Image: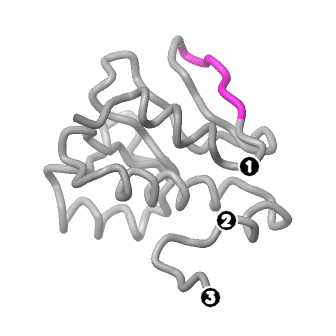
Amino acid sequence: MIGADDVRRIALSLPETVEKEAWSMPTFRVAGRMFVTVPDDGTSFAVRCPRHEREELIAAEPEKFWVPPHEASSAWVRVRLAALEDLDELHDILVDSWRQAAPDRLADTVPAPGSSTG
C-alpha cells in the first residue's frame, strides 16, 4: 500500500526539495515554495492544482481527489493515498505540483508527466 513515506521519498528525490515542518505536519518545498503537505493522519496529501483543473479532477475521480471546505479558495487539492493506482501515479502527481512551484531553471530539468522524453 502506498503511504506517507512514499510521498516523502519521491518528493525529496526532486531537485532542490527540502522538508520543513509547518502547521505540525511535513511540508515539502522547492526554492522556498511549498508543493506538497502531508497531514498527520497519513491517509492523504495535498498538492498545488489550479482551481479550474481541480474541479475537473474532483468531478472525474471524487474517490481520489477532494478539497476540504477550509481550502476551497486555495489552489490546492487533496489526494487519498489508498485511491492511487501505483507509485508511478504518485510520482506524476508530485512532479506536476513540484513543477508548479519550481523556478523555471529547475522546472525544465524534470519532464512533465506524460511528456515524451526523447
Look at the picture and state if 116 lies above or below 11: below
- Amino acid marked by disc 2: Val
Residue range in magenta is 18-23
Q: Residue at x 54, y 22 (%)?
A: 26
**For residue 118, which numbered disc appears in the image?**
3
Mark 3 or 1 closer to N-term?
Answer: 1
Q: Residues within 10 Å of mark 3 (few under 14, many from 20)?
A: few
Q: Magenta stretch: residue 107 in it?
A: no
Query: Can you name the residue that lies furthest to the right here?
Result: 105
Query: Can you name the residue that lies furthest to the front here?
Result: 118
- Mark 1 and 2 residues: CB-CB less than 8 Å, in contact? yes
The residue identified by callout 1 is 15
- Rendered location of residue 84, percent (x, y): 24, 49
Mark 1 or 2 closer to N-term?
Answer: 1
Q: Magenta stretch: residue 20 in it?
A: yes
Q: Residues within 10 Å of mark 2 (few under 14, many from 20)?
A: some
Provide the major secondary structure of the magenta segment: strand
Task: Indicate which label's residue lies in the foreground, 3 or 1.
Answer: 3
- Amino acid marked by disc 1: Pro
Left or right: where does residue 38 sit relative to residue 41? right
- Rendered location of residue 28, percent (x, y): 62, 34
- Amino acid marked by disc 3: Gly
**For residue 110, which numbered disc appears in the image?**
2
Q: Quadrant of residue 60?
A: bottom left
